[in-house]
Amino acid sequence: MKISQFQSGNFQSINAFNYQYFLPNDINQLFEIDDSLIQVQMEKSTRLLGELNAMARMVPNIDLFIMSFINNEATQSSKIEGTQTAIEDSFKKESDIKIEQKDDWLEVNLYIKAITEAINKLDEMPISTRLIKQIHEILLSSGRGVKKMPGEFRTSQNWIGGNNIDTADFIPPHHDFVNKLMGDLENFLHSQHLVPDIIKIAIIHYQFETIHPFLDGNGRVGRILIPLYLVSNNLLSKPLLYMSAFFETNKNSYYQKLMKVRMDNELSNWLLFFLKGVEQTAKHSIEILNDVLNLKDNLTETIRENTGNRANNNLRLLEKLFQMPFINVEDVRVQLEVSSATAKNIVDDLVRVEILKELTENKRNRLFAFRPYLNLLNKPFPEYE
């Protein structure tokens, strides 16, 4: 099928109820890209993914920084759903979170756990409905979603937007069709040579969000599928591209373009939007990695020049801070396997040279932030052009 001739599906009625649901057509078929704008944008996006791959190979201990990208993705993806947790809070322990923020903090941390475990499981299983259900089960394993059938496709009608089904912005397919539609999506996931992979994941994301197979958590699962697919199909060697910041920054366009595919069959515009998102996200990730490398070099020099005979231990802590940018003296003692007195001296050194900043004024259990690094992770994302 030519992309320009794509037919998304149709609306169906249930006689006993006063609403129409949308039944999408199957997607497991050959797609022909007949739009030169898509071809051009696909080349740009693929080139930027290649540059991000190259950058990842240049960064020593790249795994130190992957968790920070995942934490940022978790906060941005959850923000789309209305959760208000800053990236710095996602690094904190639950004991350091205010009571009124704990529900949001929990959702973000479940997201971090879900995506981390999913990436690890790619070594033993392909992306499949089984893995998708496992991701969902982790996401909703506690907190606000625990009663929304974690790990199971829905067995009742859901809707998107509005306070009830009568005021909904969009009503996904009836639950009787979910298993069949997800089976078709899984076949498309595993099909060979039907369409370039970067186009395929854009279509998969659209179709998954349209099926909305779970009672809750569909947006988060759908966004997790993007980096999983890119890694599992070797478009990326490391999970360093997360698109939630792009979708959050351009939230209205994101929802509008998904709806235009359903309502008006405008797949081309969705693909252009998604591909532009890949390009901008890859570029943003490359910039952050460059900034992190420069920061690490500068701080290493600062420590060597200003902390005397404790420089070696201070540099060991600097490495740890890229994984855990919130820390207390006890954490330092455990991580570096030093005495409490030595740990306190190391923390005092890094406070003095403005690498760590104290967040509390308690004499005991003081909490410190690796503020220069957190500022880089909070770098604003550009709006869609």
Image: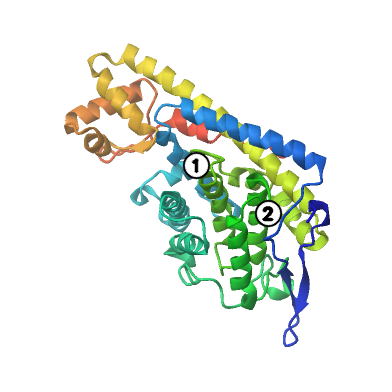
Q: Which mark is residue 176?
A: none
Q: What's under tag 1, amino acid-wise? A: Pro
Name the image quarter holding residue 288. Answer: top right
Up-down: is 251 above or below 176? above
User: Label 2 is placed on what type of residue?
Assistant: Ile
**Which residue is painted at 36% across and 51% down in the image?**
94
User: In this rendering, would 293 be left or right of 317?
Assistant: right
Which residue sits at x=27%, y=41%?
Answer: 365
The residue carrying mark 2 is: 203
Query: Would you say 8 lies left or right of 287 here?
Result: right
Residue 216, position as x, y percentages in the image: 55, 66
Can you identify the residue that label 1 sits on? Answer: 239
Q: How is the image coloured?
A: rainbow
Q: Earlier in the sequence, mark 2 or mark 1?
A: 2
* Residue 376 coordinates in the image, percent (x, y): 51, 31
The relative height of residue 96 versus residue 49 in the rendered view (above or below) is below
Q: Is residue 194 above or below residue 20?
A: above
Q: Secondary structure at mark 1?
A: loop
Is residue 236 among what the camera can see? yes
Image location of residue 301, percent across then percent down: 38, 15
Looking at the rendering, which quadrant does residue 186 occupy? Answer: bottom right
- Image check: 16 left or right of 76? right
* Quadrant for the C terminus in the image: top right
* Mark 2 crowdedness (10 Å alpha carbons): few <14, some 14-19, many ≥20: some
Left or right, 358 with respect to 19, comes to left
Q: Circle 2 sits in a helix, a strand or a loop, which is it?
A: helix
Q: Is residue 348 visible?
A: no
Is 261 in front, or is 368? 261
Name the residue at the top extreme.
305
